[in-house]
Image (cartoon, grey):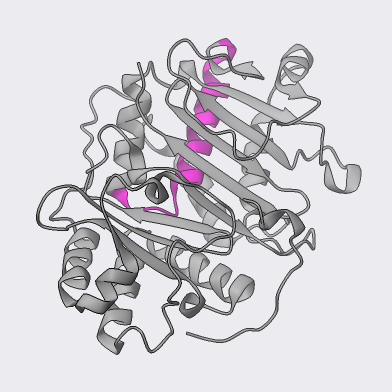
Amino acid sequence: MSKNTKQQNCSDCQGLDRRHFMKTVGGAVVASAAAPVLFDSRFAHAAPTSDSSAETAVKQFYQSLSEKQMLSICFPFEHELRKRINANWHITKPSIGDDFYTKDQRALIDTIVRNITSEEGYERLIKQMDEDAGGMDEFSVAVFGEPGKGKFEWELTGRHLTMRADGDSVDKTAFGGPLVYGHGEENVSDNMYFYQTKQVNEVFNALDAKQHEQALVKKAPKETDVDVQGEKGTFSGLAVSELSGDQKELVEATIKVLLAPYRNEDKEEVLEIVKASGGVDKLHMAFYEQGDLEGDKVWDIWRLEGPSFVWHFRGAPHVHAYINIAHRA
């Protein structure tokens, strides 16, 4: 992995942008407009399994560990650390680039990351790791449970990143639990996740004046407040059910753009969970006046939320984003 020593200041990373629209993502937006509706009942969805490519590599990685390594990075499946979320932390002390791991083990870690992302998502992730921390070598991994013998989860953590592979061990939960992503670049033209804000703001621009009033909220909730609320939850912003057909199609196209960095099995599980919770009509979209970088009314903090879905994006002063998608009655 390349060693870029550039570090961005991030005072609020310890407890727990922007304007760069990638050509590949722009193509995805165009393609999504002509694609079938996401939540069409004809579509059959699935989740990752223990035999999926990433999970197979997780099992190989686990089986390669020495007793000393297991003592440092392995935990019972129900350990509290598996459920914790943070924008900047390491579950375990050894870094991937340390002598603690063999060359083959580091290659397996890279294989896992490749297989839980799309091709474009992997490339973006590698760039983010390099710019925020100096490369994948500066991140760490943990294993919960025992792959091949019951429930398990592999987790990667570090600056602006939490990723998981669980073979659907966590029932009715996409990605195996909450994910975190981000980028420490505060230059408004260079944050690699601004393309998502650009896409989400296309929805805002398609709203009429009354819908603008409903969708625009003064203050954002705490970025880590991403517990799914279930059917009895209360959600800020504008209900997607109140949108026209064309506006709903734009919301669905936006969801496709947001999910594009991840592997198909995880994307399909997300769609299945949303469908089981009432579909896109149960979602709400909120745009926050707080944190409007440059005062340009391109809303940099936004949230897409429903009974089983939370996607909270804090784009100011730089990107911290939290995803939590799990079916709750």
Q: Nearer the viewer, residue 154 or 245?
A: 154
In the rendering, at what x and y percent does residue 95 appear?
Answer: 45, 77
Q: Give the range drawn in magenta.
A: 242-264
Q: Which corner quadrant of the image does residue 146 belong to?
A: bottom left
In the rendering, at what x and y percent does residue 34 appear?
Answer: 43, 38
Q: Nearer the viewer, residue 237 or 66?
A: 66
Q: Is residue 116 above or below residue 283?
A: below
In the rendering, at what x and y percent does residue 144 appear?
Answer: 28, 55
Q: In this view, does 53 lie above or below 102?
A: above
In what quadrant of the picture does the C terminus appear? top left
User: Left of 88 or right of it: where is 107?
Assistant: left
Q: Is residue 264 above or below residue 122?
A: above
As drawn, which residue projects farthest toward the right?
A: 295
Q: Is the magenta stretch mostly helix, strand or loop?
A: helix
Which residue shows up at 51% across the image and 54% down it?
27
Q: In the rendered image, is residue 30 in sight?
A: no
In the rendering, at what x and y percent does residue 181 appear?
Answer: 54, 54
User: Left of 318 or right of it: where is 165?
Assistant: left
**Magenta segment includes 276:** no
Q: In the rendered image, is residue 183 in sight?
A: yes
